[in-house]
Amino acid sequence: MAKDREYKVAVCMPAYIAAKTLRDAVSEIPLGCYDDLILGDDASTDGTAELAEELGLFVVRSPQNRGYGGNQKQIYQAALDRGADVIVMLHPDGQYDASLIPGFVDFVARGTADMMLGNRIRTRRECLKGGMPVWKYFCNRCLTIFENVVFGQNLGEFHSGFRVYRAELLRAIPFHDNSEDFVFDSELIAQAVHHGFKVGDAPMPVRYFPEASSISFRRSLRYGTTTVLTALKFVLQRTRLFRFRIFRQSAGD
């Protein structure tokens, strides 16, 4: 399905009970923009893994529910083991516009960035019209401002679930040491910045609907708290007051 190019692209989908949306999500991925489709099934009970295999995806199954971060660990490792040069993380619920994958991949393939994030918050009006809850928008803005200051970045947002990575980035950081929960995403950005990788973002219109996955206010509060703690660990690591395992150089690099 890949075009004639010198690098291999793997689209990785962390899935949990995604049978209702998976087929449509896969159909939105432009033909020719990828070499490998990988789905991580986090012990779903609705036939997600079986459907993925029917659709031709390479499936990595968790024997028990690991969580969002744990699922990403297994699919990224699978992508690296299968020879990917660029890794795309796409949710299988259709919340993110898969037609934009080629453009985001191009940023990474050309070396403009080592990691690209989809920025759902181009404007407040567009974001809220797309269905993002007001409280989630407010928390996103506050955390993003805080993280930009701490990490020395100028990103539109840090909390998108659409991401593209250069394989060298994932090989250089010990992502297997990260949380199994949602803060995995924040830890990975902190690690990328710490090791000097270039992080960028581009517009990714938000699409909220009943079948789209979304964490509760309580889980969001926990995510926000652990994200702030991750930023503080970053500061302590950079000032050499403490050392944290997640900021070590990967043993496999």
Image: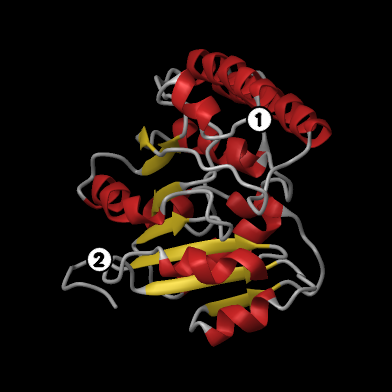
Give, as a three-letter code, the residue at label 2: Tyr
In front: 212, or 13? 212
Determine the image quadrant of residue 238.
top right
Viewport quadrant of the N terminus: bottom left
Toward the bottom, the furthest residue is: 54
Q: Residue at x 45, y 72 (%)?
A: 37
Q: Can you identify the residue that label 1 sits on?
A: 243
In front: 232, or 184? 184
Give percent across and percent down for residue 84: 38, 67
Classify residue 198 as left or right of residue 42.
left
Mark 1 or mark 2, earlier in chain: 2
Mark closer to the observer (1, 2): 2
Viewport quadrant of the C terminus: bottom left
Q: Can you identify the residue that label 2 sits on?
A: 7
* Label 2 crowd bin: few (<14), some (14–19), many (20+), radius 10 Å: some
Classify residue 53 as left or right of residue 182.
left
Determine the image quadrant of residue 40.
bottom right
Classify residue 223 as left or right of residue 138.
right
Give, as a three-letter code, the residue at label 1: Arg
Give percent across and percent down for residue 4: 16, 73
The type of colouring in the image is secondary structure
Q: Is residue 102 visible?
A: yes
Q: Residue at x 67, y 46 (%)?
A: 178
Query: SS of the residue at dot 1?
Result: loop
Classify residue 4 as left or right of residue 119.
left
